[in-house]
Amino acid sequence: MKRYTLKFTLQDSTLSSDELREAVEEVLLRLHPRITYKIRQVKAGGSGQMMAEIAVDGKRDLLESAFRAQEWKVPVRLESMGWGWMTNDGSKISTEPGSSLFELDPLAAVRPMEGNGEFQLNKKPGRLRYMIMIISTMGMVFLLIANGVHSHSLILQIAYIIGFSVWLFSLNEMPLDVRVYAEKVIFTNEGLAVKYWLRKQPARLAWEEIWGLEYTEPVCVVFKSGGKNRVLLSERFGCKEQKVVLKTIVERAGLYFVEGNFRNLLYRRYDSK
């Protein structure tokens, strides 16, 4: 389930969090019957405001439309709906009914890097593995052509089956797209820089232009205004501080955990679409 936070302006200071919780749940109950939800907490969010932290497995557009169209029976006005929860999970396991480890931010207990610095992402053995994979890909093309020319050769057919199995396993283990491979990532107070294999100059991203991050082992996608940057980021390929790198990007860009686990993560800035 994806996390969202609703921000309300109170029109009556005597309104209790339980009353607002019931009003929010009324909207959620009217959604599609197959949509499941969870209300984490409803609490004060500042002077004359309240926040409701929810998790829903439905589409955001459907959810936001329902809340925008709601005629509230309690004295509140919905100001905004955004990604994530404003309060940190910390390292504690939730004791609420129906909660699970998969609902916690996997990076909550990870400490981000302080100050400026850099991390090595893919060391020299990674280049060798990539070259071997390219050569094996060319070998597969050669075997495919040879099987077409000598279609009755049993030896070629067996070689192709064995070679294809090994190649497919290697492809699953190591991405073929050379554009995701980078030597290092550099952190400064102003932003993030990624030194790719095929670029002379690092790709630079200012913290304020980063609005999202998705991580699907082993590739990390950082979304920015007008585009995105993909980079291979995994302990299996030489980045021993994988979690620290991810946590530092999340913290400095002001992103909130939306859903996922250690192999699949989704973070967004609260006000991003």
Image (cartoon, helix red, strand yellow):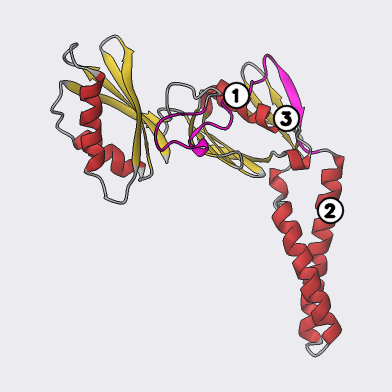
Question: Viewer-nearest of labels 3 and 2?
Answer: 3
Task: State yes or no: discs 2 and 1 in contact (Cβ < 8 Å).
Answer: no
| Distance of label 3 from label 1 (alpha carbons) | 14 Å
130 relative to 235, above or below: below
Task: State yes or no: discs 3 and 1 in contact (Cβ < 8 Å).
Answer: no
Q: Residue at x 72, y 57 (%)?
A: 171
Q: Which residues are magenta?
A: 93-122
Question: Viewer-nearest of labels 2 and 1?
Answer: 1
- The amino acid on which the numbered mark 2 sits, given as a three-letter code, is Met
- Magenta span: helix, strand or loop, mainly? loop
Question: Could you tell me how many numbered marks the image carries?
Answer: 3
- The amino acid on which the numbered mark 1 sits, given as a three-letter code, is Ala
Question: To which residue does mark 3 refer?
Answer: 241
Other residues around mark 3 within 10 Å, as few (<14) / some (14–19) / many (≥20): some
Q: What element does badge 3 sit on?
A: loop
* Front residue of 270 and 145: 270
| Distance of label 2 from label 1 (alpha carbons) | 37 Å
Question: To which residue does mark 2 refer?
Answer: 131
Q: Residue at x 69, y 44 (%)?
A: 180
Other residues around mark 1 within 10 Å, as few (<14) / some (14–19) / many (≥20): few
**Relative image position of residue 210 (x, y in whole percent):** 53, 29
Was residue 95 drawn as part of the magenta stretch in this picture? yes
Of the two numbered discs 2 and 1 on the same chain, state the one appearing first in sequence: 1
Residue 272 appears in which quarter of the rendering? top left
Q: Residue at x 76, y 83 (%)?
A: 148
**Relative image position of residue 212 (x, y in whole percent):** 51, 33
Question: Viewer-nearest of labels 3 and 1?
Answer: 1
Question: To which residue does mark 1 refer?
Answer: 109
Is residue 97 something one can see in this rendering?
A: yes
| Distance of label 3 from label 2 (alpha carbons) | 25 Å
